[in-house]
Image (cartoon, helix red, strand yellow):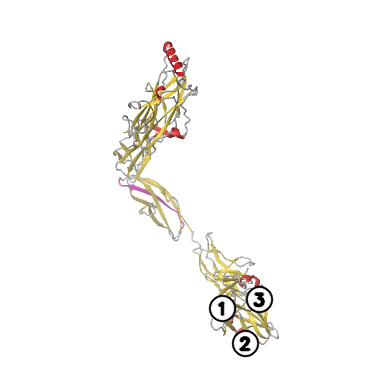
Amino acid sequence: MEGRKNDNSSKRLVSTFTLMVTILTITLCLLGAIAALQPAPVTTSTYSFYSSPSEHIFPLGGITWDVRVNFSETGGKADFVYIGEATDARDGPPADSYDTTKPPAPPTPYIYASLSDNLPAPYDILSKDYRYYPGIHKIWNLTVQWMPKSPYPSTTVTIFWSRAKINTSEYDTVILLNGAGVQVANMRTTGSYSFTCPPFTPQAFQMNCTVDTKPPQIINRSPGTGETGDSYTFNASVFDDLTPKSSLIVKVNWVHGSLSGNDTMTSVGGNYFVKTITLSNNAISDLTYHFYAKDAAKIPNINYTSQYSASITDDEVPEISADSGGVSVGTGDSVTLWVQATDNIAVTGATATVDSTPHAMTWNGVSSRWEYVYTAPTGSTASHSYSLSVTDAAANTDSSGPYTITVNDNDPPIITNVLATPSSQLINGRVNITATITDNINLAEQKVRITGPIGYTPVNASMTLSSGTTFYYNTTYTITGTYNYSIWAKDTSGKGIASTTSQFSIYAKLNISTLLVGWNFVSLPFNQTITKTNLVVIYGGTEYTWAQAVSNGYVVDVIWLWNRTVTPQIYEQASSLRPGYGYWIYAYNICGLWASNLNPMTSTNYITTLSVKWNIFGVPVNLAVNKTTFIVNYLGTDYNWTQATTNNNPTGGPIVVKDIFGWTRTIPQGYFITNILNAGECYWIYSYQTCILKRTL
């Protein structure tokens, strides 16, 4: 706050105004005489509530909260004071380091606001009044005085403050009282108060701050008795001195039998709270409960009552909640007759009466019900009547029924011994599917369902009885691959059944290569290993097994392979041909080399694993392949052909040699360098590293 400066402190004057004209005249004369010694008075108030940060300077160490209370009037005059608390402040005398005096008032017109805390001069009039933190109840005394110029009009004064600052305090209620002790504002919920201020007469106000320490009062009004399985309403009147009913949290914590709850109660008018529950249906023990109430204080006050109780009486009879009702059963089969019931204590027994004959029922703890297993006659479909009853410990009963047990033929056919012979067959070969099918009455229909590879038309064909209960379906297949089949049957009662799905396979013969006279460099053009016994030689349009072709002098029996994995690498005899490898075969005649008994093929980009030094390999696909499509995988990383055959890889040099060597089968035979690798032929390649050779699909 900016004060007026005098030439020296002994010349500081405080102007006093009264309503009497004579005193006013004398005062004006004195002011005129002194005017030559003082600066001219300013025309606006020297108390501005738009303060800069430098206007609020105080020791920060112990302050927990403070708020600036501002005063302004319609003519633009204003003033302010600070109130707050600090952990090292003091209430009342003597003054502490936080208490700040208020300088004398400026020339009229002005508003002069101040605080008082019964401190001796010069601290009897304060601009800042800090009290000890924390507190339970404190009052700050505020005074505001309107000093106008003639003709001494009244004005409207507005007191305003920061609610956010107020609400940082520990107090639950902060109310502004006028001089008559009447509340004029709730300072936590409103930010200002305006009133008509007369001239000259100081207007007294109080900021009354209170911490709510009183818990809510609870009066139990609940009934003293109840009945099992019925509703029960807790009633309580709950009052609080500061928290309105809408902000109270009221709960009831209760236990009855196996049931319990900690439930919120609802206000139903005034301060009356209720909560309705359903009592346990299987307990006659007392209902015990506590009430809990919490107010809305900053540190909530809680009242948790001692235990109350209500006696619960048993007036229930057993009640059937569900039963098996009308049932159907197949001839010779069993059906479970069952009943579920509730009772306030317990159901002690149950009876199933079938065709006037009572049968004791057994308790099934897993299904939580009483059960009786009824077995229908095997040779009759006549209906039967039954009823159910339950009894509790007090001999109270409840019953249901009568119901009808309907007996019918519900046994589907039985399918066994499902078989495809053979389970692996060459293309155009015949597969015989058989099954044993029986029924308790009569069969009406039996079929086989067959699905196969692409191009095969699915079959849903009737089967033929061969003898007894054995049925068959026999046909040939022209498409290689795996076939799925299942058997389906239906009896004269319309009951159908299907077997699980089984499989058989159709294999084919594939051309490997055409052998010319002399040495032939051969590889498999498919991804499947072939034994010599599954090789077929076609000469002059006739098929020969490998053994027959050797015996007839068409080929040499020994097939040579290059063992790439041993040191030193050597030729060895081969008993089978593996995809990705190469073989030497000598033929005395031009003939075709085929493979038989092949399985369905799988597609893969894997060619072979190369060893260090020389490798004989072929691409296991039935088409010509360019070496530029090769991928070399070294230590888990793929490299294209250019990268693998140059220095563009981690080895510091090529992984494999770029030149691939093929073999000319025609006379004169010999090696040649090639970029294209044909199906059924094999090639030499040199590798510097152990690596995997793949291709781009």
Q: Which residue does the image show at 44% across and 20% down from the upper left?
A: 146
The secondary element bearing badge 2 is classed as loop
Which comes before the other along the chain, label 3 or label 1?
1
Q: Residue 557 is drawn in which quadrant?
A: bottom right
Q: Position of residue 650 (x, y in %)?
A: 57, 70
Which portion, as a residue range, is magenta?
A: 380-393
State whether the magenta stretch is mostly helix, strand or loop: strand
What residue is pinned by disc 2?
Answer: 556
Per the image, the residue denoted by label 1 is: 612
Residue 167 seen in the figure: yes
Asked if residue 247 is positioned above or below residue 43 in the image, the reply reads: below
Name the residue at the right extreme.
667
Which amino acid does the dot numbered 2 rest on? Answer: Val
Q: Name the residue under label 3.
A: 679
- Neighbor class of circle 1 (other Cα within 10 Å; few <14, some 14-19, many 20+) is some
| Residue 625 point in image, percent of width and height | 66, 73
- Above-or-below relation of 458 to 356: below
Q: In this image, 517 relative to 236: left or right?
A: right
Q: Which residue is drawn at 54% across and 66% down?
A: 501
Mark sitting on residue 95 = none
Q: Is residue 382 magenta?
A: yes
Which amino acid is tagged 3?
Answer: Ala
First in sequence, mark 2 or 1: give its number. Answer: 2
Quadrant housing residue 544: bottom right
The N terminus, quarter of image = top left
Label 1: which secondary element: loop
- Front in this rendered view, residue 288 or 407: 288
Between the C-alphas of marks 3 and 1, the distance is: 25 Å
